[in-house]
């Protein structure tokens, strides 16, 4: 709750309660008061504005009757969500939209995303969203409360640049047991998201590195590497992933890849191709493989695929992982495992960079993993995602005559490719007309994007009921089923 500054005008044609009502309504409509934000009590606001309490009561009553605010027993008054309310007047060509994490992003009123008109989305098959309904809020609150209750001055000190030793030991044990990663806690660097770790990696590898990336690839990493002035070579993929034999012709010194579950194609790199990549890296000093293992926890058929780093005997793999998919995006904790040779360079040249994750968050995550909550959470989420995955596959059976379905049995999205080569844009626009938002493969391509006839269907952030509604909309849009 924040102080509310309202300039009341005694000579206004509007009475005092109407001025208070109009001010708060405008604040909520323009999202300066966010949904769920607490308002001052009627008593404190009346005292602050030097008006009678009944005047504020009238204003609040009118706002409640129109749905702008709500009263919660024994807690006070709170702003309601007004998403989708019709707004009179032109807000200008450029507007501000607030995202789920509270940040503001500028959007153009005439902009379209994936062929979907703004405001008409009924089902959003985003491949980036996760299901937060299974998050163990009570356990997280309990751990947080215990840590803050028992906290001493040391917890609020700067801490080590690579992250707290206890958390790195816990991550080390987890990676070895779940992914087969062989490392020491000293090789692990903890950071706030993969963006920071890639920025740090640029300081370690040096500038003007010639790096190879898959096509299609994770576009955010591609954009980050471009910001380094790296010379990026895109290498096409086959059914086994990035074609290792092409690397020798490109004179590259690093390869960014996702062997356990490539984004966005969902390809799992076979052991033979992995050995080819490791052989290429071993042929010359200074060559490295950057393994992005972003969602390896979610596999629904067979045993988990070991990390590429697990097969590395010569210290050529830089392993990067995150808890954003497995726990929650807001956790913002990622980690990087450096080979011994690069660890020496980090300690010599980059160890003065402070850790970007607070020690409190590190302590919470460490206890969450150490006490078994993380393992139980993963088991629960695998069941939830598998149920959605299986439902989506069943509902898509009627589409198989017109589409090839791929990317199943792992991750949080599937791919549909038109057998007739219908352009991606047309598929997206037809789906949009039925209120279904899809995402095109071209968004992840660095070349030949216009040739795409493939769309992505994410199931992580939608309910089973929404899956059914969305597939019904696609059946109408594409005349399938």
Image: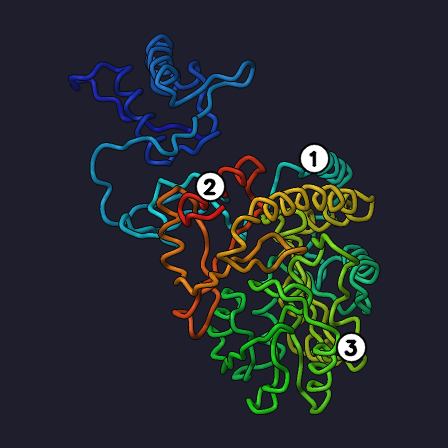
Can you name the residue that lies furthest to the front here?
401
Dot in front, 2 or 1: 2
The residue at 67%/69% (across/down) is 259
Whether residue 223 is visible to the viewer of this picture, yes or no, is: yes
Q: Secondary structure at mark 3?
A: loop
- Figure quadrant of residue 186: bottom right
Residue at the spot of label 3? 312
Residue 211, image x and y in percent?
Answer: 56, 81
Q: In the image, residue 63 lies at what x, y percent?
A: 35, 18
* Viewer-nearest residue: 481 or 83: 481
Q: Which is more N-terminal, label 2 or label 3?
A: 2
Tell me whether circle 3 and circle 2 mark residues in contact (CB < 8 Å).
no
Q: Which mark is residue 123?
A: 2
Q: Are marks 2 and 1 in contact (CB under 8 Å)?
A: no
Mark 3: few/some/many CA within 10 Å (<14, 14-19, 20+): some
Looking at the image, which residue is at 62% across and 43% down? 391
Left-right relation of 479 to 248 = left
- C-alpha span from label 3 to label 1: 39 Å
């Amino acid at each position: 709750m924040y102080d509310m500054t309202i300039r009341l005008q005694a000579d206004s044609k509007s009475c005092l309660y109407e001025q208070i009502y109009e001010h708060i309504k405008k604040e909520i409509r323009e999202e300066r008061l966010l949904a769920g934000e607490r308002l001052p009590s009627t008593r404190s606001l009346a005292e602050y504005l030097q008006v009678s309490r009944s005047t504020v009561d009238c204003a609040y009553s009118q706002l409640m009757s129109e749905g702008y605010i709500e009263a919660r027993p024994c807690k006070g008054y709170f702003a309601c969500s007004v998403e989708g309310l019709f707004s009179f007047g032109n807000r200008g060509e450029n507007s501000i939209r607030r995202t789920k994490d509270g940040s503001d992003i500028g959007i153009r009123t005439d902009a379209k995303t994936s062929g979907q008109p703004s405001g008409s989305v009924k089902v959003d098959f985003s491949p980036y969203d996760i299901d937060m309904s299974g998050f163990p809020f009570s356990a997280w609150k309990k751990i947080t409360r215990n840590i803050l209750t028992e906290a001493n001055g040391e917890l609020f000190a700067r801490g080590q640049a690579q992250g707290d030793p206890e958390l790195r030991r816990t991550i080390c044990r987890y990676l070895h047991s779940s992914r087969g990663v062989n490392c020491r806690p000293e090789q692990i660097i903890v950071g706030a998201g993969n963006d920071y770790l890639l920025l740090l990696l640029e300081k370690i590898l040096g500038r003007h590195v010639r790096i190879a990336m898959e096509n299609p690839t994770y576009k955010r990493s591609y954009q980050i590497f471009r910001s380094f002035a790296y010379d990026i070579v895109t290498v096409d993929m086959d059914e086994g992933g990035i074609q290792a034999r092409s690397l020798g012709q490109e004179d590259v010194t690093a390869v960014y890849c996702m062997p356990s579950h490539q984004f966005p194609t969902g390809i799992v790199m076979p052991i033979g191709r992995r050995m080819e990549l490791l052989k290429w890296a071993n042929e010359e000093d200074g060559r490295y493989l950057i393994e992005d293992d972003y969602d390896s926890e979610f596999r629904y058929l067979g045993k988990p695929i070991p990390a590429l780093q697990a097969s590395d005997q010569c210290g050529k793999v830089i392993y990067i992982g995150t808890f954003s998919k497995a726990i929650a995006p807001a956790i913002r904790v990622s980690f990087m495992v450096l080979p011994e040779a690069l660890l020496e360079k980090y300690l010599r040249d980059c160890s003065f960079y402070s850790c970007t994750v607070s020690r409190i968050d590190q302590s919470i995550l460490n206890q969450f993993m150490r006490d078994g909550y993380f393992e139980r959470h993963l088991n629960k989420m695998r069941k939830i995602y598998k149920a959605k995955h299986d439902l989506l596959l069943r509902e898509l059976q009627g589409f198989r005559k017109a589409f090839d379905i791929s990317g199943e049995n792992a991750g949080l999205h599937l791919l549909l490719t038109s057998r007739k080569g219908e352009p991606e844009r047309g598929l997206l626009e037809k789906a949009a007309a039925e209120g279904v938002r899809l995402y095109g493969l071209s968004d992840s391509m660095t070349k030949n994007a216009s040739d795409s006839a493939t769309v992505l269907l994410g199931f992580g952030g939608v309910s089973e009921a929404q899956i059914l509604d969305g597939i019904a909309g696609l059946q109408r849009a594409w005349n399938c089923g």
